[in-house]
Image (cartoon, grey):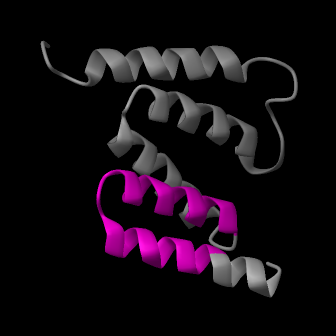
């Protein structure tokens, strides 16, 4: 598995599960869990896994501007500027509408 992202991904998932067992990690839509998982995935540079987590969050909660904004930041980080711009505009529009 040399050069494979799997060992890092497994370690990140294990760490996120450990962090998610503590008090205050349950809640509305599991947002705190998603934040913890995303932080670990970003830290480990597992951007594809972070993108999947964010897009599944957008599917579950399409009116949440923060998800669109962070997804835009991720796309910007990996050089997908056009998609990044669209996500950030979506976040701005949702924020402006107060959704």
Q: Residue at x 74, y 18 (%)?
A: 21
Percent x, y of residue 89:
55, 80
User: In the rendered view, would you say 35 is above or below 85?
Assistant: above
Give the side of residue 26 with respect to residue 6, left or right: right
What is the residue that sits farthest to the left in this orientation? 2
Front residue of this view, candidates 71 and 63: 71
Task: Answer whether residue 80 is magenta in the image.
Answer: yes
Give the side of residue 39 with respect to residue 96, left or right: left
Q: Residue at x 45, y 78 (%)?
A: 86
User: In the rendered view, would you say 58 is above or below 98?
Assistant: above
User: In the rendered view, would you say 48 is above or below 6?
Assistant: below
Percent x, y of residue 62:
62, 71
Front residue of this view, candidates 55 and 86: 86
Task: Answer whether residue 19 is magenta in the image.
Answer: no
> How many marks overall?
0
Q: Residue at x 53, y 27 (%)?
A: 40
Based on the displayed image, in which of its 4 quarters is residue 76 positioned?
bottom left
- What's the magenta bit mostly, secondary-structure-wise? helix
Quarter of the picture containing the C terminus is bottom right
Give the side of residue 89 with respect to residue 64, left or right: left
Quarter of the picture containing the N terminus is top left
Based on the displayed image, in which of its 4 quarters is residue 25 positioned?
top right
Front residue of this view, candidates 84 and 3: 84
User: Magenta region: which residues?
Assistant: 64-91
User: In the rendered view, would you say 63 is above or below 71?
Assistant: below
Q: Residue at x 33, y 44 (%)?
A: 48
Percent x, y of residue 24:
87, 28
What is the residue that sits farthest to the right in this orientation? 24
């Amino acid at each position: 598995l040399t050069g494979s992202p799997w060992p890092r991904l497994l370690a990140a998932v294990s760490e996120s599960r450990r962090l998610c067992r503590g008090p205050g990690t349950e809640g509305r839509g599991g947002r705190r869990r998603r934040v913890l998982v995303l932080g670990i995935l970003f830290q480990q540079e597992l951007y594809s896994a972070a993108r999947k987590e964010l897009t599944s969050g957008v599917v579950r909660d399409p009116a949440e501007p923060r998800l669109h904004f962070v997804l835009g930041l991720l796309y910007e980080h990996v050089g997908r500027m056009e998609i990044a711009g669209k996500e950030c505009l979506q976040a701005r529009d949702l924020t402006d509408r107060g959704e």
